[in-house]
Image: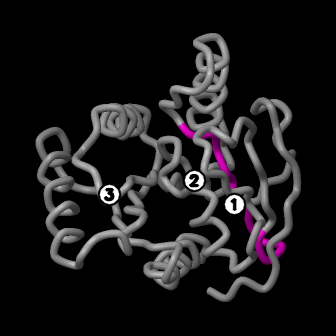
């Protein structure tokens, strides 16, 4: 898939304020500071499309981008941020879960995982919840440029083994780096395959 155009549409504070179109939506989510905005900018080829920040928890709304006039890329707030108060955290969690569980246009959810870390409980609990509600999702390992090839493959294998303790089969998985564009073609080809 070639990205011909990528434009910001709107930021929505709740599912009821999301665009009323029937376009398929591919949403991206992950823990704070997983490299979500950088990945979105790398995928679309538009620097600064999604706002990147060294401070975790920057995305606090559901951000919509129109890609090739055909589908929406949706940037969801991260989960598990320590920087916001409990009330705000509960509101964000409710908004995220509402979108994932109830948004009919959601075609696939990409769950971003930092490839440098051991499996984290917060991620696996979230993935298991997706399985329970039957949402189609894929796992995207980020920041692989920060590891040697051997360490990267070892960490991904560890993750697979961990998930297979509670899953019969694994979702599609992608290995990416926003720095050197690793995984860009594979991710875009996967989206194109779903769309066709």
SS for callout 1:
strand
Tell me how far mark 3 sits from mark 2, CA to CA. Answer: 15 Å
Q: Which residue is mark 3?
A: 171
Q: Which residue is mark 1?
A: 73
* Residue at the (24%, 69%) spot, across then down: 152
Quadrant in the picture for residue 182: bottom left
Quadrant in the picture for residue 60: top right
Circle 2 Cα neighbour tier, 10 Å, few/some/many (<14 / 14–19 / ≥20): many
The answer to whether residue 105 is magenta is no
Quadrant in the picture for residue 99: top right
Q: Which residue is mark 2?
A: 28
Circle 1 Cα neighbour tier, 10 Å, few/some/many (<14 / 14–19 / ≥20): many
Dots 1, 3 in contact, CB < 8 A: no
Residue 8 on image: x %, y %: 85, 61
Q: Out of 97 and 60, give the one closest to the viewer.
A: 60
For marks 3 and 2 on the same chain, the one whose residue lies earlier in the sequence: 2
Tell me how far mark 1 sits from mark 2, CA to CA. Answer: 8 Å
SS for callout 2:
strand
For marks 1 and 2 on the same chain, the one whose residue lies earlier in the sequence: 2
* Residue at the (42%, 63%) spot, across then down: 142
* Residue at the (60%, 64%) spot, across then down: 38
Q: Out of 18 and 21, give the one closest to the viewer.
A: 18
Indicate whether 91 appears above or below 110: above
Dots 1, 2 in contact, CB < 8 A: yes
Looking at the rendered image, the disc whose residue lies closer to the viewer, 1 or 3, is 1
Residue 167 on image: x %, y %: 20, 44
Q: How is the image coloured?
A: one colour
- Left/right placement of residue 94 relative to residue 173 reads right
Name the quadrant of the C terminus: bottom right
């Amino acid at each position: 898939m070639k990205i011909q155009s990528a434009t910001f549409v709107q930021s929505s504070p709740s599912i009821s304020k999301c665009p009323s179109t029937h376009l398929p939506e591919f949403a991206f989510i992950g823990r704070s500071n997983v490299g979500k905005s950088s990945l979105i900018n790398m995928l679309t080829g538009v620097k600064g499309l999604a706002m990147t920040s060294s401070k975790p928890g920057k995305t606090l709304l559901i951000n919509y981008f129109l890609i090739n006039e055909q589908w929406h890329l949706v940037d969801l707030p991260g989960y598990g941020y320590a920087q916001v108060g409990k009330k705000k955290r509960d509101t964000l969690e409710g908004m995220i879960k509402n979108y994932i569980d109830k948004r009919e246009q959601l075609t696939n959810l990409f769950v971003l995982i930092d490839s440098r870390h051991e499996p984290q409980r917060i991620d696996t609990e979230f993935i298991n919840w997706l399985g329970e509600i039957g949402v189609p999702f894929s796992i995207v390992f980020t920041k692989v440029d920060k590891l040697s090839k051997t360490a990267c493959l070892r960490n991904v294998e560890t993750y697979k083994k961990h998930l297979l303790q509670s899953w019969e089969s694994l979702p599609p998985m992608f290995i990416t780096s926003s720095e050197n564009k690793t995984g860009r073609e594979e991710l875009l080809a996967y989206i194109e395959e779903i769309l066709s």
